């Protein structure tokens, strides 16, 4: 089976490509490298011993995309490509709407033109906004608080409309919770540009001494210790979820949460990171970050029941693997 992986050089895409190659799928990556590096391809080869076909191309270029579809004859598409920085999306919303929406619409027209029926799409828990209760189920009301999140919600709507008009399509929307961790080899991981916004990449840099101190945003949340609670999931478990979605015999339009179903507070995560890595993380409490919510974790019952999804890795693994990748790869 030949799979197109858009954004396959990125953080989640590269881990998924490794799993696909390990299961003997043929992989073609399209990535414009706007937020990733070509070296990832060599690392994938080093881990799996297998080659992928790579096109450095922008999905917003419809003609180029059509040519690739014509040549490659895909059986299915996993669509990771997109811009994902929440703060930047507030500053430059048009960049996010243009990139994330046009790329997806181009992809859908090519799939239609070349008869590709199966799509797995990367959505986010951000589409639930501030949930009324926990754990979050797939049928909870949807709302967003920033342009990045709105692009995910709009794409979900586009997929629902396109499916309504073409019920022979087979579309899976995966709503990720908070992916962290890295490949066990230490070769693949998350390496955001500039000063990180997300918790784990920030913790890693403080532990390595490149950033002086971690600001813990808020200590008065209605949670176990006053700090924000999230559902952190190992990127390798997340990657596995995509293979299960691809192999799911159930057709139609399906939506699944991919999370562990367990909430972890900022302090719990930092304490675990210090313990398993035997390293100190300087920290201070500061004001809440605008737009943050108290707690967010998934009900993963639907994914467990329908996909056989089960998380293998613990918070301890996530902390170890994130630090291992950083020590080996990040030029701090
Ligand atoms: P990433 O930035 O590491 O990977 C995305 C890849 O897409 C990058 O390699 C980038 O170069 C590529 N890309 C972006 N726009 C493109 C375009 N127009 N044409 C071709 N390539 C393009 O991000 P990630 O963390 O691997 O996330 C993958 C997907 O999952 C994204 O859609 C993201 O919004 C979604 N998601 C991520 C998280 C997270 O915390 N990482 C959470 C929820 C959802
Ligand atoms: C953020 C995005 C969300 C996106 C997700 C994954 C916002 C408001 N939300 O979610 O849309 O899908 O990333 O990319 O940006 N924290 C600190 N100090 C830090 C960084 C974070 O205390 O330096 C805390 C936060 O307040 C939160 C937790 O750590 O309680 C996790 O934060 P983060 O990793 O940014 O993820 P989310 O806020 O869940």
Image (cartoon, rainbow, N blue to C red):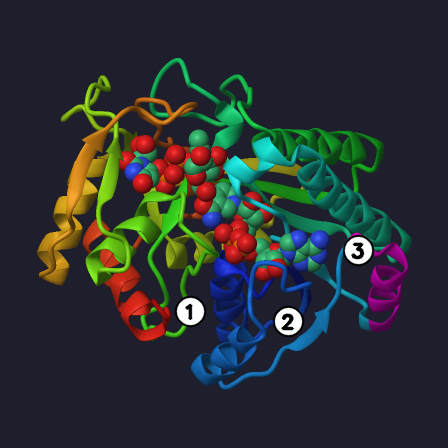
Q: CA distance from mark 2 to mark 1?
A: 17 Å
User: Which mark, by number, is residue 27?
Assistant: 2
Residue identified by numbered label 3: 116
* Of 301 and 99, the residue lying toward us: 99
Measuring from the top left, give residue 153's x and y in whole percent: 63, 29
Quarter of the image containing the C terminus?
bottom left
**Circle 3 SS class:** loop
Q: Residue at x 83, y 61 (%)?
A: 65
Give the SS element for disc 2. strand
**82 within the magenta span:** no
Please tell me which residue is depicted at 35% across the width and 47% down the height of the picture.
233
Q: Any atom of ligand 1 within 8 Å of the CB at mark 2?
A: no
Viewed as shown, does residue 29 lie left or right of 216? right
Q: Quadrant of the N terminus?
A: bottom right
Mark 1, secondary structure of its residue: loop
* CA separation in Å, label 1 and label 3: 29 Å
Residue denoted by label 1: 188
In the rendered view, would you say 127 is above or below 187? above
Residue 66 inside the magenta-drawn segment: yes
Q: Residues within 10 Å of mark 3 (few under 14, many from 20)?
A: some
Residue 151 horizontal/vertical position (percent):
65, 34
């Amino acid at each position: 089976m030949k799979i197109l992986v858009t954004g396959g050089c990125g953080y989640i895409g590269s881990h998924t490509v490794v799993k696909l190659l390990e299961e003997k799928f043929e992989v073609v990556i399209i990535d414009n490298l706007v937020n990733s590096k070509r070296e990832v391809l060599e690392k994938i080869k080093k881990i799996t011993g297998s080659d992928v076909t790579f096109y450095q191309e922008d999905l917003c270029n419809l003609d180029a995309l059509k040519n690739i579809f014509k040549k490659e004859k895909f059986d299915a598409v996993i669509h990771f490509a997109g811009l994902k920085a929440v703060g930047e999306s507030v500053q430059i919303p048009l960049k996010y709407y243009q990139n994330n929406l046009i790329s997806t619409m181009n992809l859908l027209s090519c799939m239609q033109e070349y008869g590709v029926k199966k799509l797995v799409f990367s959505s986010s828990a951000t589409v639930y906004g501030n949930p009324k209760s926990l754990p979050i189920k797939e049928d909870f009301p949807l709302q967003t608080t920033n342009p990045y999140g709105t692009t995910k919600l709009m794409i979900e709507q586009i997929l629902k409309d396109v499916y309504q008009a073409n019920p022979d399509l087979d579309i899976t929307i995966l709503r990720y919770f908070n992916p962290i961790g890295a490949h066990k080899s230490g070769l693949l991981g998350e390496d955001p540009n500039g000063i990180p916004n997300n918790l784990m990449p920030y913790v890693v840099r403080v532990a390595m001494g490149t950033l002086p101190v971690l600001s813990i945003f808020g200590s008065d949340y209605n949670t176990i210790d006053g700090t924000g609670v999230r559902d952190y999931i190992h990127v390798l478990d997340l990657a596995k979820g995509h293979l299960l979605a691809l192999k799911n015999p159930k057709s139609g339009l399906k939506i699944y949460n991919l999370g562990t179903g367990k909430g972890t507070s900022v302090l719990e995560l930092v304490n675990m990171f210090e313990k398993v890595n035997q390293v100190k993380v300087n920290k201070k409490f500061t004001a809440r970050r605008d737009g943050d919510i108290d707690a967010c974790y998934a009900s993963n019952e639907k994914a467990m029941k329908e996909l056989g999804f089960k998380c293998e890795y613990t918070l301890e693994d996530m902390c170890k693997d994130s630090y291992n990748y950083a020590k080996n790869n990040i030029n701090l």
